[in-house]
Image: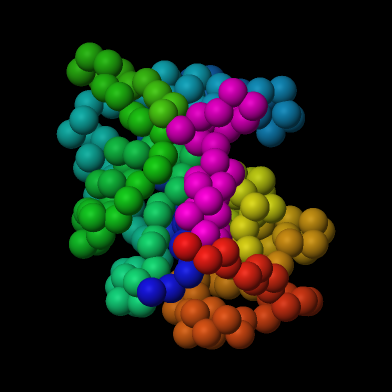
Amino acid sequence: MSHWTILCDFDGTISVEDITDALLVRFAKPGWEDIEQAWKRGEIGSRECMARQIALLDASRDELDAHLDEMAIDRAFPVFAAAVREAGVPLTVLSDGLDYSIRRILANNGLGDLPVVANRLVAEGERGWRLEFPYSSPDCRSGNCKCASAGSAHADRRRVLVIGDGASDFCVSGEADLVFAKHRLIEHCRAAGIPYVPIASFADALDLLPTLLAGELAAHGQVAPLPALQAA
């Protein structure tokens, strides 16, 4: 059995585009972009940002589903997910996005059994929506405290591989043993001295998997720190 566990972001990492942003562009009432700018300026955290934005959605479930069914994922991700399952590596989709969206898109691609840890989308009436945050933390401004999931994996004496692309992955990357980084996360890991390997897609992640499992993967600029596991 592998001693690794994988925590993988969804929006912009597994999915081709940010699903929440796509829904807001299509269905939100005016004002969601002002909320987005307040978050970018650091005036509010992502939890408050998303709660306020989702409250502006005006869509029936059928309309939401039809839009989600058009959303694409990285073509290599199903193959990667199958490979890590075969290797006995736990893979969890860890997202600060919407659980309903993630589960529907994964199910559309034959991946409906993957564990998902994300914010909970709840219908209010025929066209309204709100968010609940079952994985939040009092000390974290995000809706989903990803660092808590990494801590749980380490408590189980597993090494943590984080796969992500952006700001919601910055904090948890510091808790990982290694990061497969896309886009903005590459620059963050480089600046923070976090061991990482840059990837463009899950085709790259799939190619790296055998070396990772063999414990021989060199991170960018340094050898990935693989701490000795405590005896069970």
Position of residue 189 in the picture relative to residue 117 (left or right): right
Residue 22 in sight? no
Position of residue 5 in the picture relative to residue 169 (left or right): left
Q: Position of residue 23 (x, y in %)?
A: 39, 37
Tell me what residue is drawn at x 46 percent, y 45 percent.
95
Q: Is residue 113 above or below residue 57?
A: below
Tell me what residue is drawn at x 56 percent, y 47 percent.
151
Tell me what residue is drawn at x 57 percent, y 64 percent.
230
Magenta-span inclusion, residue 126: no
Residue lying furthest top = 125
Residue 132 in sight? yes
Q: Is residue 189 above or below residue 85?
A: above
Q: Look at the image and give the residue range highlighted in magenta.
A: 135-163
Q: Position of residue 139 (x, y in %)?
A: 64, 27
Q: Nearer the viewer, residue 3 or 164?
A: 3
Q: Nearer the viewer, residue 187 or 224?
A: 224
Tell me what residue is drawn at x 30 percent, y 18 percent.
128
Q: Is residue 216 above or below residue 176?
A: below
Position of residue 97 in the picture relative to residue 66 (left or right): right
Q: Position of residue 196 (x, y in %)?
A: 67, 68
